[in-house]
Image (cartoon, rainbow, N blue to C red):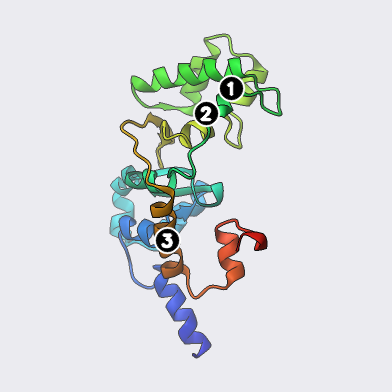
Amino acid sequence: MHHDTWKGIILQKQGLLKPQSVQQICQNLNGLQAQFQPYVHVGFRNRMTAEDFYESSWQEDLTRQWSIRRTVHAYLKSEIPLYIHEGRLASTDYLKTEGRDGFSPQTKQKYHQLILEALEQGPMTREELKSLCRSEKMTLEEEKQVFNAWGGLFRYMVERGEVYQEYGAKRFHRLTDFQPLSREKAELEIARRYFAGFGPVSLADARYYFKENKSTS
């Protein structure tokens, strides 16, 4: 196969030759990596028509949170049960054990309950939740632990299927009636999308994507 032909196939699979809907983009590529929102916004813009992109209501269909390789991705809210499947659910032991940073079980449980109860009343931003917690005499050290930039308590709540974060406004919502897919069903679908959307790939590519090492292959 000519190299240019191969590149054309990859660009087509990546949705960079023909505009797609946000649903197609997310379902074909397992969402888009989104540690830095300005960059993922460009990723959507490059794959959508200008009309669809600037209409902006598409953002309401998305969440931005931990997913593939436990890194932040933007993907469809309707597919949270796919990416937070039974094999990825955080253990409730998190709330019962002390963290390496000294994050005590008592503190975790206190703010876990406070945040859940607040979100039952409606969505709130990270800053609004910080203000709420501060009103409950949260110390500076506790604030660093709960609102840790690498996830903290919120990562646990996302990976338990308790809350989700909006893509655009970055508000947290209470997730209700959450039913995760089985690990087998979810992993097969995620793998199917990967090989269909990114292939041809090497074994090393696949290992990296799924965060596997040679001993697990």
Say whether disc 3 or disc 2 marks the residue closer to the N-terminus: 3
Q: Is residue 31 depicted above or below 153 in this figure?
A: below
Q: CA distance from mark 1 to mark 2?
A: 7 Å
Say whether disc 3 or disc 1 marks the residue closer to the N-terminus: 3
Q: Is residue 195 depicted above or below 188 in this figure?
A: below
**Residue assigned mark 3:** 29
Q: Is residue 3 depicted above or below 116 in this figure?
A: below
Q: Residue at x 42, y 21 (%)?
A: 116
Asked if the residue at tag 2 contacts the one at tag 1, i.e. Cβ–Cβ closer than 8 Å, the answer is yes
**Residue assigned mark 2:** 92
Q: Would residue 177 be visible to someone looking at this image?
A: yes
Q: Specify the quadrant of the image occupied by residue 104.
A: top right
| Label 1 secondary element | helix
Residue at the bottom extreme, as displayed: 2
Q: Residue at x 41, y 30 (%)?
A: 162
Q: Is residue 176 left or right of residue 32?
A: left
| Label 3 secondary element | helix
Q: Position of residue 18 (x, y in %)?
A: 34, 71
Q: Is residue 70 left or right of residue 195?
A: right
Q: Amino acid at mark 1?
A: Lys
Asked if the residue at tag 2 contacts the one at tag 3, i.e. Cβ–Cβ closer than 8 Å, the answer is no
Q: Is residue 3 depicted above or below 118 in this figure?
A: below
| Label 2 secondary element | helix
Q: CA distance from mark 3 to mark 2?
A: 30 Å
Q: Amino acid at mark 2?
A: Thr
Q: Would residue 46 be visible to someone looking at this image?
A: no
Q: Nearer the viewer, mark 3 or mark 2?
A: 2
**Residue assigned mark 1:** 96
